């Protein structure tokens, strides 16, 4: 069996037309007919081949599927996503056909990077913004956003290393520096932010000692 590297190799043309990177990730859901859990991991895509793990009925199959546009087909199942957060899966053998709706699972690493208080100031537009990611559970994040003196709080949506909340969002690559997008009035502003580091309890103890 040909070995496929763990990194993905998606052509710029396919990414531009089909957004094939949306397919990458861990997809979980249930079959609509029997409500049994099903999971499909698209580990990487290289050209027209995807490395996948398909878990159903308590066991996991591993192998390589074929990529066609914004779909991946592995044995008897095909997964399709348009937005990278929700997907449809179809199982078809002869006259038997089942469907499932799947949600992409946020990775623990990305979740941990996002949690915290992000604050910053933009010299370009003069905006100050604070974006607090209080907690993350699956694709939901509890957030609090302050921009131009206005505070909004509620549940945002997690997608990879980004939390989207209404027309605001925070994204980070390294877990220390990020960018907040906020809307003030009818205008949208980008504000560079840094994660505030909590005070070390050990240093406090040392000072008291």
Image: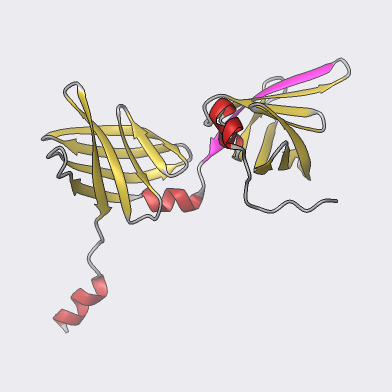
Q: Could you tell me which residue is drawn at 24 percent across and 33 percent down? A: 182
Check the image and report above or below for 209 versus 71. below
The percent coordinates of residue 40 (x first, y second) are: 68, 38
* Picture quadrant where residue 158 is located: top left
The x, y position of residue 108, in whole percent, is: 49, 51
Relative to the observer, which residue lies in front, 132 or 17?
17
Residue 209, given in percent of the width and then of the height, sits at 17, 84
The one of 159 and 209 positioned closer to us in this rendering: 159
Figure quadrant of residue 39: top right
SS majority, magenta: strand
Residue 39 included in the magenta stretch of the image: no
Say if residue 70 shows up in the picture.
yes
- The stretch in magenta equals 96-105
Which residue sits furthest top? 95
Question: Is residue 173 found left or right of 2 in the rendered image?
Answer: left
The answer to whether 103 appears left or right of 182 in the picture is right
Pick whichever, 150 or 126, lies toward us.
126
Residue 47 position (above or below residue 100): below
- Residue 61 appears anywhere in the view: no
């Amino acid at each position: 069996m040909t070995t496929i590297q763990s990194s993905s190799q998606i052509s710029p043309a396919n990414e531009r037309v089909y957004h094939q990177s949306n397919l990458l990730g861990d997809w979980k859901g249930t079959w609509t007919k029997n409500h049994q859990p099903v999971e499909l991991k698209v580990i990487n895509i290289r050209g027209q081949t995807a490395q996948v793990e398909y878990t159903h009925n308590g066991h996991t199959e591993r192998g390589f599927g074929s990529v066609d546009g914004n779909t991946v087909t592995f044995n008897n199942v095909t997964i399709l996503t348009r937005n990278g957060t929700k997907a449809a899966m179809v199982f078809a053998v002869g006259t038997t056909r089942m469907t499932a709706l799947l949600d992409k699972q946020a990775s623990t690493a990305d979740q941990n990077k996002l949690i915290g208080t992000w604050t910053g100031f933009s010299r370009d537009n003069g905006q100050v913004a604070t974006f607090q990611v209080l907690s993350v559970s699956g694709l939901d994040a509890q957030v609090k956003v302050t921009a131009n003196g206005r505070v909004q709080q509620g549940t945002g949506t997690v997608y990879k290393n980004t939390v989207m909340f209404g027309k605001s969002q925070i994204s980070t690559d390294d877990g220390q520096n990020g960018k907040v997008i906020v809307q003030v009035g009818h205008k949208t502003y980008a504000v560079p932010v840094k994660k505030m580091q909590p005070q070390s309890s050990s240093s406090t103890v040392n000072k008291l000692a």
